[in-house]
Image: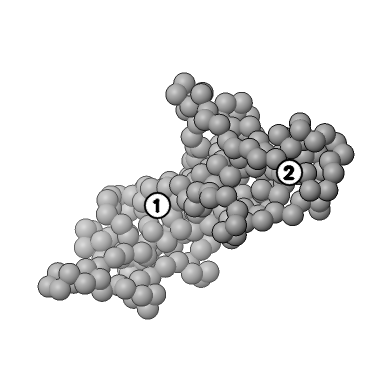
């Protein structure tokens, strides 16, 4: 998954001042309070802020030696700094491509993503998210395409037999790195979203690399061989 269970457990443990082995995280139970869906690169920021605030409130209320059954209810307040500061994640993508002069096939042997995403709670799960996003972007750049039947208005590429996505054989050496960034305004943890930042620049980097290799600018994805051979 996205590493939510691991990251939220770490956030709760830090806020309470205990080890992660003492945290029993519960998610996905209708008996629990409502929360937002995991989307829009907002998961850890929204859930984590609420969890962090509740954990700190529990510690402030019950101290270092709470009794069994002690509890507290808390929520995440609005951020007054959001109207004054940009709180986005940023990234830069670099791609190396090889274009077959005869077939027009594009391969991507190497990609690098460098990101500024605030505090990284768990480096292993964060790297997995970023590399997964870069793979998604590579797939969007070279393979994925929704084809409509102009007569019937039906989707022709309606299943994975016809809708092509990148597989292991299509993905070369991917590397995701980030700079150490401290943002005191974004939220109590200093975290930012990483769900989509790995995706959005990947396709553009690949398209620019194809242009550098061939002199042909393809502006509609995916970059398929016919678009390169037909324009040459």
Q: Is residue 168 above or below residue 22?
A: below
Q: Percent from the top left, x then y, of residue 31?
A: 60, 57
Residue in the foreground of this view, choosing between 115 and 96: 115
- Which residue corresponds to the image point at 57% horizontal and 50% vertical from the top-left? 33
N-terminal-most mark, 2 or 1: 2
Label disc, if present, on residue 141 of the rendered structure: none
Estimate the spatial distance between the alpha carbons at disc 2 and disc 1, rounded to whole Å: 48 Å
Q: Residue furthest bottom?
A: 161
Does residue 139 appear left or right of residue 66 in this picture?
A: left
Q: Percent from the top left, x then y, of residue 193?
A: 53, 42
Q: Quadrant of the N terminus?
A: bottom right
Q: Is residue 215 above or below residue 81?
A: below
Q: Quadrant of the C terminus?
A: bottom left
Q: Percent from the top left, x then y, of residue 70?
A: 78, 44
Front position among marks 2 and 1? 2
Color style of the picture: one colour
Q: Is residue 172 above or below residue 87?
A: below
Q: Percent from the top left, x then y, of residue 216?
A: 28, 52
Helix, strand or loop status at disc 2: loop
Residue matched to label 2: 71
Does residue 139 appear left or right of residue 57 in this picture?
A: left
Mark 2: give few (<14), some (14-19) or many (20+) Cα within 10 Å: some
Q: Residue furthest left?
A: 151
Residue matched to label 1: 203
* Residue 79 seen in this snapshot: yes
- Which residue corresponds to the image point at 43% horizontal and 46% vertical from the top-left? 201
Helix, strand or loop status at disc 1: helix
Mark 1: give few (<14), some (14-19) or many (20+) Cα within 10 Å: many
- Which residue corresponds to the image point at 32% horizontal and 60% vertical from the top-left? 222
Q: Quadrant of the rendered structure where residue 194 is?
A: top right
């Amino acid at each position: 998954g996205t590493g939510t269970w691991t990251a939220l457990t770490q956030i709760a443990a830090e806020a309470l001042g205990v080890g992660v082995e003492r945290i029993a995280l519960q998610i996905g139970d209708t008996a629990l309070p409502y929360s937002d869906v995991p989307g829009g690169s907002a998961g850890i920021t929204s859930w984590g802020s609420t969890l962090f605030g509740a954990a700190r409130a529990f510690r402030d209320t019950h101290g270092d030696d709470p009794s069994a059954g002690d509890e507290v209810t808390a929520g995440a307040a609005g951020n007054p700094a959001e109207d004054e500061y940009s709180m986005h994640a940023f990234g830069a993508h670099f791609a190396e491509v090889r274009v077959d002069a005869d077939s027009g096939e594009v391969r991507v042997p190497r990609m690098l993503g460098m990101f500024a995403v605030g505090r990284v709670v768990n480096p292993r799960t964060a790297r997995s998210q970023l590399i997964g996003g870069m793979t998604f972007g590579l797939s969007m750049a070279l393979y994925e395409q929704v084809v409509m039947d102009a007569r019937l208005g039906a989707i022709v590429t309606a299943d994975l037999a016809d809708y092509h996505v990148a597989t292991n054989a299509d993905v070369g050496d991917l590397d995701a790195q980030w700079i150490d960034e401290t943002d005191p305004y974004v939220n109590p943890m200093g975290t930012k979203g990483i769900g989509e930042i790995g995706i959005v620049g990947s396709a553009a980097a690949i398209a620019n690399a194809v242009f550098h290799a061939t002199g042909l600018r393809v502006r509609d994805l995916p970059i398929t061989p016919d678009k390169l051979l037909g324009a040459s």
